[in-house]
Image (cartoon, rainbow, N blue to C red):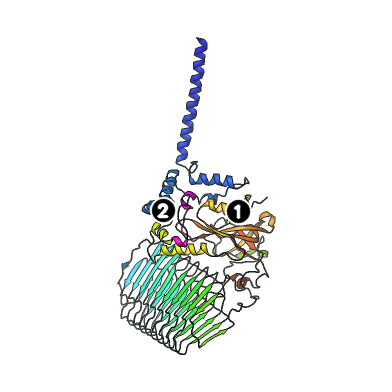
């Protein structure tokens, strides 16, 4: 009996222990369901994938883990089923919110019509998202100034309809308009139509904007000597598009000056349709247009058609840009005594593609000159007379060497990266909207190719000719671009895909680095302690750069023959550490273009020097693990 009681007590004790263990486990499990440590969450799945694919035991990079999808395990499974069933479009808004995507490119903004002080001078400072209709119509003299307009907001918009119409001697100044906005839209319809004299000056217009969307329809049409100047227009922006339709149509002596238009921009697009059509004595100058840009696309259709005595000048157009494409269709067709000059046109780092179709066809006494023109050009049905090619397809100066030009220190020599040296940091800030990766089980079920644009537009609610449509097309164009010589590349929308590409290129014993923060951006800094990755030996890396897309998307490519460094960044005055930078030095520059910005900045030419640059905020570089 005693033995039975003892046995029962033992069983009760064991059951109690088991019960306590179960309660503790359930409690722990329930707590984890509400945390990032949930074993079924995308973040935990990423950690397991890292452990499976990467062979070393080094600490996992917190900056990469922070980009994992914030979706709960339940939501991830739910949206994966919707994506598999082509039903995600019906739940886009809650999906974008829960998954930390950026789907608001086409959101409507407040465009209230403002007619105050319509016939007096105006100084618009710190003014946000307004529409102007018939503003300044018939005005004599005076000036309107837009300065600090829609500064640094998320969605900036301005509608200028029939602005300054039939005015005389009136000036419009757009200075520092919509800087640092995320998505900026501008609609100029019948702006300055039939205006006489005066001028429109766009200076520092929409700089550092993520997605500029600008539309000029019948701008300055039937105008008489109303000068237009675009200076530092949409510089340093990302993606976006400008549309000029019937710009200066029927104009008389309308000068248009595009200087430093789209400089250092990323995948910017411009469309000129019917620009200067039937104009008289037009004078258009494109200087440093799309210079230093990445993959700019410009379309000129029926530009200057039927014009009389027009002068068009393209100087240093798309100079030192990466790739890009220009299409000139029926440019200056049926014009009379038109003169067009292409000087140092298309000297790209990675040569782009230009197509000329029916250029100056049907024109009377055309005068078109190409001097030191770039490569990869197609001429179809081109005018047979009045065309000269001087230095055509000649290298853009065999070697650019000599005097150093400091342009925000985007590039530097390896010898400059030493403790105690002072240098100017470029703008290393991440200007993209905050987004997260998608779990691979969702991203793998979404289309991503130029042949599936219609489906992508349906999923992300992109209207025709909308900002979202352009974002999609630009990303696809960048990702589907043919690799450069010796380049291996892939676009990745999940952290797992990025790990796979890096491991396939470098092997499983790898790690990833990025610059710690944005401190020191655009100012002079002192270099602190410098450490060479892999002992400073020549290595190979995989660099990944963000692309603009609703979810976090990276363009990753292999970079051979480099040295990678980590360096403390110190404040100039206090010498205290403010950042931990990652720099990469390209040792073989023999295949780079002589006009590459690095050589313009540093002197010398291809193959003569190594070229270094910082890894910008939220970009990253993978290397083999440092021992």
Mark 2 lies on residue: 96
Q: Is the magenta stretch mostly helix, strand or loop?
A: loop
For the image shown, how many numbered marks are present on the structure? Answer: 2
Rendered image quadrant of residue 159: bottom left
In the image, what residue occupies the spot 44% across and 54% down?
A: 101
Q: Where is residue 572 in the image (x, y as percent from the top left)?
A: 60, 62
270 or 135: nearer the eye?
A: 270
Segment colored magenta: 424-452
**Eye-nearest disc, 2 or 1:** 1
Q: Answer left or right for 34 relative to 411.
A: left
Mark yes or no: residue 568 visible. no
Q: Position of residue 96 (x, y in %)?
A: 41, 53
Q: Answer left or right for 217 relative to 261.
A: left
Comes first in the chain, label 2 or label 1: 2
Rendered image quadrant of residue 463: bottom left
Mark 1 lies on residue: 504
Q: What element carries label 1?
A: helix
Residue 196, disc: none
The Cα atoms of the two marked residues, 2 and 1, are separated by 31 Å
Q: Is residue 450 magenta?
A: yes
367 or 81: nearer the eye?
A: 81
């Amino acid at each position: 009996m005693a033995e039975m009681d003892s046995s029962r007590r033992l069983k009760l004790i064991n059951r109690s222990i088991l019960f306590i263990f179960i309660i503790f486990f359930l409690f722990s499990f329930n707590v984890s369901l509400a945390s990032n440590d949930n074993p079924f969450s995308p973040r935990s799945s990423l950690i397991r994938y890292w452990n499976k694919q990467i062979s070393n035991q080094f600490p996992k990079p917190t900056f990469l883990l922070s980009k994992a999808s914030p979706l709960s395990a339940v939501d991830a499974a739910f949206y994966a089923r919707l994506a598999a069933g082509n039903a995600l479009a019906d739940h886009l808004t809650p999906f974008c919110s829960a998954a930390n995507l950026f789907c608001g490119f086409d959101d409507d903004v407040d465009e209230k019509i403002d007619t105050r002080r319509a016939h007096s001078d105006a100084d618009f400072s710190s003014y946000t998202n307004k529409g102007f209709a018939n503003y300044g119509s018939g005005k004599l003299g005076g000036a309107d100034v837009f300065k600090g307009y829609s500064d640094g907001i998320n969605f900036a918009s301005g509608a200028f309809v029939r602005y300054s119409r039939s005015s005389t001697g009136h000036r419009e100044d757009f200075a520092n308009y919509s800087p640092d906005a995320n998505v900026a839209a501008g609609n100029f319809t019948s702006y300055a139509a039939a205006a006489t004299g005066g001028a429109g000056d766009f200076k520092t217009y929409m700089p550092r904007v993520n997605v500029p969307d600008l539309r000029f329809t019948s701008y300055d049409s039937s105008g008489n000597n109303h000068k237009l100047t675009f200076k530092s227009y949409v510089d340093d922006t990302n993606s976006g598009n400008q549309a000029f339709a019937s710009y200066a149509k029927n104009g008389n002596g309308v000068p248009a000056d595009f200087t430093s238009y789209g400089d250092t921009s990323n995948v910017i697009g411009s469309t000129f349709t019917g620009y200067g059509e039937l104009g008289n004595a037009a004078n258009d100058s494109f200087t440093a247009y799309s210079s230093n840009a990445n993959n700019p696309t410009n379309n000129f259709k029926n530009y200057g058609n039927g014009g009389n005595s027009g002068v068009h000048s393209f100087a240093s157009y798309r100079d030192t840009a990466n790739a890009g494409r220009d299409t000139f269709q029926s440019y200056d067709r049926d014009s009379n005594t038109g003169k067009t000059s292409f000087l140092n046109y298309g000297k790209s780092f990675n040569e782009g593609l230009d197509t000329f179709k029916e250029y100056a066809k049907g024109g009377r006494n055309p005068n078109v000159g190409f001097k030191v023109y770039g490569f990869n050009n197609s001429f179809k049905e081109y005018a047979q007379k009045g065309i000269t090619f001087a230095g055509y397809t000649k290298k853009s100066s065999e070697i650019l060497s000599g005097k150093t030009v400091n342009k925000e220190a985007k590039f530097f020599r390896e010898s400059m990266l030493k403790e105690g040296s002072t240098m100017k940091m470029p703008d290393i800030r991440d200007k993209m909207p905050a987004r997260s990766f998608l779990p691979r089980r969702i991203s793998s079920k979404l289309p991503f190719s130029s042949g599936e644009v219609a489906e992508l537009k349906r999923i992300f609610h992109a209207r025709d000719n909308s900002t979202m449509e352009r974002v999609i097309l630009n990303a696809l164009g960048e990702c589907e671009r043919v690799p450069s010589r010796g380049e291996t590349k892939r676009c990745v929308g999940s952290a797992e895909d990025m790990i796979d590409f890096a491991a396939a290129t470098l092997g499983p014993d790898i790690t990833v680095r990025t610059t710690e923060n944005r401190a020191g951006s655009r100012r002079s800094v002192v270099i602190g302690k410098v450490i060479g990755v892999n002992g400073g030996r020549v290595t190979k890396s995989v660099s990944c750069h963000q692309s603009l897309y609703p979810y976090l998307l990276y363009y990753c490519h292999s970079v051979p023959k480099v040295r990678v460094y980590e360096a403390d960044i110190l404040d100039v005055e206090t010498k205290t550490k403010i950042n931990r930078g990652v720099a990469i030095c390209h040792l073989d520059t023999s295949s780079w273009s002589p006009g590459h910005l690095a050589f313009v900045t540093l002197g010398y030419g291809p193959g003569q020097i190594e070229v270094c640059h910082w890894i910008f905020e939220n970009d990253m570089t993978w290397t083999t693990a440092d021992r």
